Amino acid sequence: MKYLVDTCGWIEWLTDGRLAFLFEPYLRHSEELIVPTLVQYELYKWVCRERNATFALEVVGMTEEGLVVPLDTKTALYAADVSKEYKLAMADAIVYATSKSQNVMLVTSDKHFKNIPHIKYFENRKNH
């Protein structure tokens, strides 16, 4: 079964955060990963800020072991509809729309996804 792990899951795993053990099974098998280019963007930006560009490129390399999915017109328009329906910010809507267009489960701890269908949501108490 394939999965799309949201940026927050990658960050939890990379930093060995409190929820890292929950995301690890989904990130362990790169052949099962769907990775939107938006997640690559967010990870690269975050890792550059928190660490350095060299490590950020290594992380992007890890994401490329999965199936990288660029944003196309169909998904962009679907994301706009999803954004209105669930009141999601652009990035969250694109990630969710990508998971739906690829017919895979979105795995996240982002509280914006908490009550949206077809999501594997991990509660993160610090999000409250």
Image (spheres, rainbow, N blue to C red):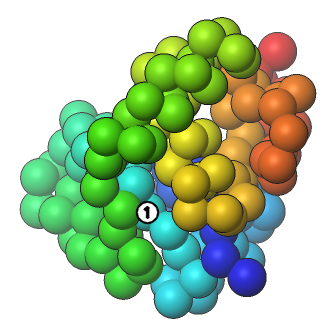
Q: Residue at x 40, y 76 (%)?
A: 67
**Figure check: 30 above or below 109:** below
- In the image, taking residue 120 as reference, residue 23 lies left or right, namely left
Work out whether residue 68 or residue 6 is closer to the camera in this orientation and state it.
68
What residue is disc 1 on? 35
Residue 1 at x, y percent in the picture = 73, 82
Residue 119 at x, y percent in the picture = 80, 47
Query: Looking at the rendering, which quadrant does residue 115 occupy?
Result: top right
- In the image, taking residue 31 as reference, residue 39 lies left or right, namely left
Work out whether residue 2 or residue 126 is closer to the camera in this orientation and state it.
2
Q: Residue at x 61, y 11 (%)?
A: 84
Q: Can the viewer see residue 70 in this picture?
A: yes
Q: Residue at x 71, y 54 (%)?
A: 107
Query: Looking at the rendering, which quadrant does residue 126 occupy?
Result: top right
**Figure check: 45 above or below 86:** below
Residue at the far left in the pictured view: 54
Work out whether residue 40 or residue 89 is closer to the camera in this orientation and state it.
89
Q: Residue at x 20, y 43 (%)?
A: 48
**Figure check: 101 above or below 45:** below
| Amino acid at the residue labelled 1 | Val
Q: Can the viewer see residue 20 in this picture?
A: no
